[in-house]
Amino acid sequence: MIMKTKLSFIAITFFSSALFWVGVSLAAEQKEQLVWDAGLVQLELEKLAPGVYAYYPTDAKEKNPKGYPVATSGGFVVGEKGVLVVESMVNARLAKQVMGFVKQVTDKPILYVVNTSYHGDHVYGNYVFPESAKIIQHSKTKAFMDDKKAFEADKKFMTSYFGANRGIEEVSARTADLIVDDKKTIDLGNKKVEVLHFGFAQTEGDLFVWVPEDKVFWTGNPVVAMPPALPWLLDGKHEEVLATLKKVRIFLPKEAKVVPGHGVPIKPEDIDFKIRYLETLHREVKMAVQKGWTLEEAKKNIIMEKFQGYALWGWVHSQVNIPNTFKELSSKR
């Protein structure tokens, strides 16, 4: 129990620091407030296939191509028996927007809510959904949220970052009724939905959601948005992340519609940009380590110009991805 709490607080501290530096980076590089506000975000609904819908922020179509960050995306699948929702959002306000979308298209009950990770903007809205709806999570996500001290610390941080009086203070932890650590098929009647774990992708508990009949796929944070958005190696393990993204890429047919963690639907080929970035990062950092460069020298010289364009490039690439990759490859010498 002590070790679990300690690890949870380490995760919170790292994630909190990461989000803090997102704000600093945006303020310094863009000189305007671009970080999304949970009290202002509005979602829009897009039908991807019969009974299959994505929702994403109304500013995503404008900001994603420019590399600016936006709020969380998700979706839902409607079957004869009921509805499966992907992502519950960061507060009651946004969770109710999602439930409102469901009511627009069907009077069938929400049977399942899938959380793709433990991050607050993907799980905090769980408590708003009907008690009859079953929450689906990876065991690592459930363990994090079941740690009361860690969860309360996470809420306080999220409140300080997204602002007070955005409904985060009222959030209560609602965790898994169904655990998926590998694969589970959910039968909604005329629709089958697969909940999948491909391996470490950004956290230990990343889940992906696939509708085989309609070839629609939700990624959560491992694929943040269309290029030029980069993978965030917040917990390191760049080689595992790369291996997982390659598995995902092989899994997806070329005609699939992919809903990323924070943006409009994209194509499977858009994931190639993330894979090439990680391959190049590995190669260049490995060379830096072999040459005996310091971390500061690596950060200064590994510029990878053809992958630039993300609004958070200076932070994600230089302050997170290079240092974590450098540490991992240095430890193998």
Image (spheres, rainbow, N blue to C red):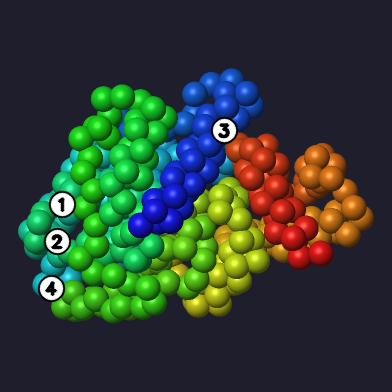
Pinpoint residue 24: horizontal percent, then vertical percent: 57, 27
Residue drawn at point x = 31 percent, y = 60 percent: 142
Q: What element carries label 3?
A: helix
Pinpoint residue 220: horizontal percent, then vertical percent: 42, 57
Q: What element carries label 4?
A: loop
**Is 108 left or right of 331, judged from the image as shown?**
left
Q: Residues within 10 Å of mark 3 (few under 14, many from 20)?
A: some
Work out whether residue 190 can be spotted.
Answer: yes
Label 3 or label 4, whichever lies nearer to me, is 3
- Quadrant of the image occupied by residue 184: bottom left
Residues under labels 4 and 2: Cα distance? 16 Å
Q: For mark 3, what is the residue?
A: 21
Residue drawn at point x = 70 percent, y = 59 percent: 328
Q: Earlier in the sequence, mark 2 or mark 3?
A: 3
Disc 3 marks a residue whose amino acid type is Trp
Q: For mark 2, what is the residue?
A: 133
Residues under labels 3 and 4: Cα distance? 45 Å
Disc 4 marks a residue whose amino acid type is Glu
**Is 98 left or right of 22, judged from the image as shown?**
left
Q: For mark 4, what is the residue?
A: 80
Label 2 or label 3, whichever lies nearer to me, is 3
Disc 2 marks a residue whose amino acid type is Ala
Label 4 or label 2, whichever lies nearer to me, is 2
The reply to whether discs 1 and 2 touch (Cβ–Cβ < 8 Å) is yes
Residues under labels 3 and 1: Cα distance? 32 Å
* Quarter placement of the N terminus: bottom left
Q: For mark 1, what is the residue?
A: 129
Q: Which of marks 3 and 1 is nearer the N terminus?
A: 3
Q: Earlier in the sequence, mark 4 or mark 2?
A: 4
